[in-house]
Image: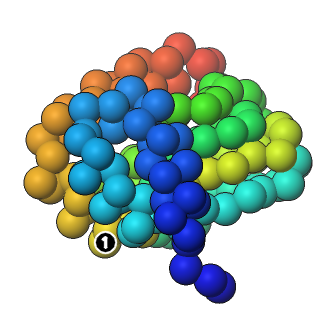
């Protein structure tokens, strides 16, 4: 794998900045994050996260759409600027749902270690993640028989 070029880093940083989660970061922090992250282009109809697997990554969608599925039910659709994979990182637990691509999708992946190294210095990021997690849990509660 080749190291990302300056232009790649710029476009990753620009994609990351569009996420509500990371919008508060300054340019230096975004560039640092872009250096840590891995960009993956995933074809349509591919599994990204499997329910029950050990969670090692945190994902931010740059382009495309993914579907979150649990117990055979579609529980959420996530697009550019949204993130997934946070639950298994907070608690050392298996993935709570399946996530599959609905179209060709570009994501940025941070490993558990990179994520924690970064987020522990950014309380605002942790606050946004916790807010989103609590909203997602409420939504999941409203889906019958999960
Ligand atoms: P994780 O459990 O690590 O892996 C599956 C992911 O699906 C989970 O983290 C969340 O990011 C996401 N997820 C689970 N439930 C919901 C929901 N109700 N709405 C949106 N995303 C969800």
Along the horizontal axis of the image, is 113 left or right of 49? left
For residue 110, what is the image quadrant? Answer: bottom left
Closer to us: 61 or 57: 61
> Is residue 91 in view?
no
Q: Position of residue 97 (x, y in %)?
A: 60, 45
Q: Residues within 10 Å of mark 1 (few under 14, many from 20)?
A: few
> Is residue 2 in view?
yes
Closer to us: 139 or 84: 84
Along the horizontal axis of the image, is 27 left or right of 40? left
Q: Position of residue 120 (x, y in %)?
A: 14, 55
Q: Position of residue 109 (x, y in %)?
A: 52, 60
Q: Secondary structure at mark 1?
A: helix
Q: Is residue 139 above or below residue 3?
A: above
- In the image, is the residue at mark 1 within 8 Å of ligand 1 by its beta carbon? no
Q: Mark 1 = which residue?
A: 113
Tell me the residue at 56%/70% (across/down).
5
Along the horizontal axis of the image, is 125 left or right of 107? left
């Amino acid at each position: 794998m080749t190291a990302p070029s300056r232009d790649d880093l710029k476009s990753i940083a620009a994609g990351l900045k569009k996420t509500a989660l990371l919008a508060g970061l300054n340019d230096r922090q975004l560039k640092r994050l872009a250096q840590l992250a891995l960009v993956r282009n995933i074809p349509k109809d591919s599994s990204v996260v499997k329910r029950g697997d050990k969670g090692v990554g945190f994902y931010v969608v740059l382009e495309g759409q993914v579907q979150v599925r649990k117990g055979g039910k579609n529980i959420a659709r996530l697009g550019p600027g949204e993130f997934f994979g946070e639950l298994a990182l907070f608690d050392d637990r298996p993935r709570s749902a399946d996530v599959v691509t609905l179209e060709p999708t570009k994501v940025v992946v941070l490993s558990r270690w990179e994520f924690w190294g970064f987020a522990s210095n950014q309380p605002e990021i942790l606050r946004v993640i916790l807010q989103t997690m609590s909203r997602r849990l409420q939504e999941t509660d409203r889906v019958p028989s999960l």
